[in-house]
């Protein structure tokens, strides 16, 4: 090597070292392997399920009473607590009794007078009758005595009717509840004048029964015909229209139906304007402490009615289902620990479980069907892709 090439070699050495170092680093870098997602799997549950029709209803009282004044007068007391539960015969209001007590005393005096006159005319009639038999009395005297006796007897009956009316009016001064239930608001306070009588009487409050409670709902014609057909085939527990078991649930029950009742009323005609018929189901509504009764009159309630016989179905947890553009699907793990997507047709919801009626692999026309031995991913679904490997936890 000549001396003139030495500076050039010295300048190229750093570049050579950098190139070798770069090649060495590229050869040593290895792409990290993607972590296998861990998922929880469970087997589908085989269970008997019941097909239902669902309706919207309202809670209604079995009994309802409007408490109105039956006599006119001033209210002296209104002792009930608005919104509380009362029993049959509890006092709702008191009207001033003094005018009616005075009227009763006046009629009682009239009764005593009428009875005294009736006794006197009866004695006169008996005396003239005896004299007439002996020829000592004329026919005219006998007729007059007979008329006076009958007139006095009729006056006694008239006074007795007035006495009964006066006693009733005095009883009406104390207004009592004819049914047991929950009393409404106080519409008139003590000291006010109220009007009684058959027309224009003053409304004091209302009472509605609370146990049991009826739930009224409208059933369409097709559902009614399916229900009747199931009865004729013996597919329902009760073959009678007015003993069909139903279930109900409130909005806070999140799709469950914890209340059990029985249909007690089926209307006598279908409404031609809506094509529906009105039914009422009766539900026990016992008082619970704390919290009171579950159902209140006027409450919105969801009702389901059984249609058809029990049948077997495969159910998976609701958490196993996802949705994409309206299509429900789930993942199962095969023997190679590969996630397989199945599009499904979901059916009934039973608590936190959902029935799978049909299943198929996307892109294939034939049903794949969900098997009782399939390991369904129920947790970690968002980390799974079709065809990807997964680590399963039973």
Image (cartoon, rainbow, N blue to C red):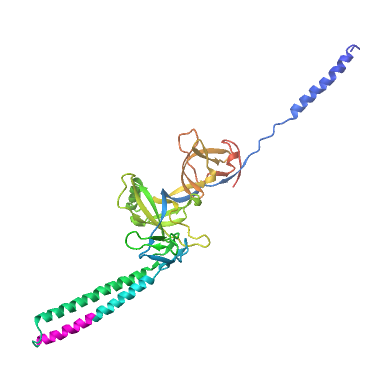
Q: Is 76 or 304 nearer to us in this picture?
A: 76
Q: Is 136 or 372 nearer to us in this picture?
A: 136
- Estimate the x, y position of residue 137 in percent, counting from the top left: 10, 85
The answer to whether residue 87 shows anywhere in this view is: no
Left or right? Give the position of 69 relative to 135.
right
Q: Residue furthest left?
A: 135
Residue at x 19%, y 81% (from the top left corner): 121
The answer to which image quadrant residue 245 occupies is bottom left
Q: Vertical placement of 338 versus 122: above or below?
A: above
Residue at x 16%, y 84% (from the top left corner): 126
Q: Vertical placement of 30 versus 237: above or below?
A: above
Q: Residue furthest right?
A: 3
Q: Vertical placement of 74 versus 247: above or below?
A: below
Is 118 magenta? The answer is yes
The answer to whether residue 165 shows anywhere in this view is: yes
Assign the magenta stretch its main secondary structure.
helix
Q: Residue furthest bottom?
A: 134
Q: Is 342 or 199 nearer to us in this picture?
A: 199
Q: Is 283 or 356 nearer to us in this picture?
A: 283
Q: Vertical placement of 235 versus 140: above or below?
A: above
- Estimate the x, y position of residue 283 in percent, counting from the top left: 42, 58
Residue at x 53%, y 38% (from the top left corner): 341
Is 239 magenta? The answer is no
Query: Which residues, given as a range, are shown in magenta?
Result: 117-133
Q: How many marks?
A: 0
The answer to which image quadrant residue 260 occupies is bottom left
- Estimate the x, y position of residue 130 in percent, counting from the top left: 13, 87
Residue at x 26%, y 79% (from the top left corner): 113
- Estimate the x, y position of residue 25 in percent, counting from the top left: 76, 28
Q: From the image, which quarter does the N terminus lie in?
A: top right
């Amino acid at each position: 090597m000549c001396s003139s090439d030495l500076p050039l070699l010295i300048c190229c050495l750093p570049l050579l070292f950098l190139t070798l170092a770069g090649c060495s680093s590229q050869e040593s870098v290895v792409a990290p392997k993607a972590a296998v997602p861990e998922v929880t799997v469970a087997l589908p549950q085989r269970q008997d399920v019941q097909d239902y029709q669902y309706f919207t209803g309202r809670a209604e009282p079995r009994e309802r009473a409007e408490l109105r004044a039956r006599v006119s007068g001033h209210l002296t007391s209104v002792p009930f607590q608005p919104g509380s539960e009362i029993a049959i015969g509890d006092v709702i209001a008191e009207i001033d009794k003094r005018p009616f007590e005075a009227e009763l005393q006046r009629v009682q005096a009239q009764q005593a007078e009428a009875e005294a006159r009736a006794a006197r005319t009866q004695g006169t009639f008996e005396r003239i009758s005896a004299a007439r038999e002996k020829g000592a009395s004329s026919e005219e005297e006998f007729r007059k005595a007979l008329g006076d006796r009958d007139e006095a007897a009729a006056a006694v009956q008239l006074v007795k009717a007035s006495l009964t009316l006066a006693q009733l009016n005095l009883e009406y001064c104390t207004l009592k509840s004819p049914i047991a239930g929950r009393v409404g608001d106080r519409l008139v306070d003590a000291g006010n004048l109220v009007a009684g009588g058959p027309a224009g009487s003053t409304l004091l409050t209302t009472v509605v029964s609370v146990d049991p409670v009826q739930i009224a709902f409208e059933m369409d014609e097709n559902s009614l015909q399916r229900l009747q057909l199931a009865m004729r085939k013996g597919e329902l527990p009760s073959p009678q229209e007015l003993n069909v078991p139903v279930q109900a649930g409130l909005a806070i029950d999140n799709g469950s139906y914890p209340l059990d009742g029985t249909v007690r009323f089926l209307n006598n005609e279908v409404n031609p304007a809506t094509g529906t018929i009105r039914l009422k189901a009766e539900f026990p509504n016992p008082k619970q402490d704390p919290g009171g009764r579950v159902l209140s009159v006027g409450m919105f309630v969801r009702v389901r009615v059984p249609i058809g016989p029990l049948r077997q179905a495969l159910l998976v947890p609701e958490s196993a289902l996802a949705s994409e553009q309206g299509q429900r699907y789930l993942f199962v793990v095969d023997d190679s620990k590969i996630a397989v997507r199945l599009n499904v047709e979901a059916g009934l919801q039973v608590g936190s479980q959902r029935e799978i009626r049909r299943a198929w692999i996307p892109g294939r026309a034939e049903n794949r069907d969900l098997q009782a031995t399939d390991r369904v991913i129920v947790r970690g679904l968002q980390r799974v892709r079709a065809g990807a490997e997964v680590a399963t936890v039973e």
